[in-house]
Image (cartoon, grey):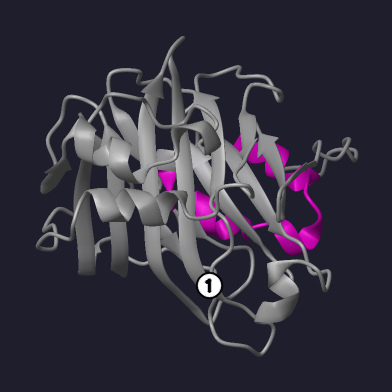
Amino acid sequence: MCCFSRPVRAVTNTRVFARAMPGGRQALVYGMRLAIDEELAMVLPIPVAAGTPEDAVSFVDLSGYPTLLDDLDRCAPDASPSRSGAPQAAPRAKLVVQAVGAFEASFAPSVGDLDRLDDRFRVPRSVWAALPDVADRGFVVFKLRPDARGWLGRLVQAPAREAHPMAFVFPTRAPDALFFPTLHVHDGAAHPTATFDHALFWQGPTRGDRSAPAEVVARHVGYDRAAGLVARGAAVERRTMRGEHPNHDVWVG
């Protein structure tokens, strides 16, 4: 999901890699080209089991491998676009914030825990109320740091740019499928359809529009820099989604 706490000027070239991990967990790597004019956050509702604790999500720093998604792109050339488609409580402790390369990241176990974020990093309550499918999910929040050394500082009143991918591993409630956060909220509302510019990559038994054999992947991907997120000796599948599509998340498998 490209779901932002404030309006954005442009989001393009979204690329997401997913892989099933041992112990009922799933890895996600998320990258995009983004143009923004103010400090904000991207929020990703993820399908965790009820009662998942705050320390259940492991964030992965890919600042040492900013081209991981570029390398996956080289493995599986482009294909034709896919056609799928209360009363106020007392203040609570703020969510734990972790530095993850160019980002700050938090995990909110439930939609109610999002109130523990600073106001500028919250998506309006009306958005979640209009999306019953995410009512029982957890939420990964990436806060885009505004300091001059970070990429966000260079984006203000500047053309869209890309930072290194955001990555994390989470306990999934559906270990037999792979989840891709593709629901769009760019202007404070979730519309029935959205314009997609997405490439989805995964490793697993389900075939995509294009497939890169394991030997091709080995030529392009730096496994030692990928922090264990990409499996050695496995093919990479790809699906592209461009143009107007129903505005919802995608599941594979």
239 displayed left or right of 19: left
Instruction: Please tell me which residue is depicted at 36% across the width and 67% down the height of the picture.
Output: 191
Element under disc 1? strand
Question: Considering only vertical position in the picture, is 233 above or below 83?
Answer: above
Give the residues in magenta: 110-132
Q: Residue furthest bottom?
A: 157
The residue at which mark 1 appears reads as 34
The residue furthest top is 23
Q: In this view, does 79 lie above or below 131?
A: below
Residue type at mark 1 is Leu
Image location (x, y in percent) of residue 137: 51, 33
Dot 1 surroundings within 10 Å: few (below 14), some, or many (20 or more)?
some
Residue at x-position 60% and y-position 19%:
52
Quadrant in the picture for residue 125: bottom right
Q: Position of residue 33 (x, y in %)?
A: 48, 70
User: Quick check: 208 left or right of 250?
Assistant: left
Most foreground residue, 238 or 39: 238
Measured along the vertical axis of the image, is residue 192 above or below residue 38?
A: above
Q: Horizontal and vertical percent for residue 25?
A: 46, 19
Is any atom of residue 248 visible in this view?
no
User: How far from the left and from the top, in percent, is residue 154?
Assistant: 70, 79
- Give the quadrant of residue 219: top left
State whether residue 113 appears in this view. Answer: yes
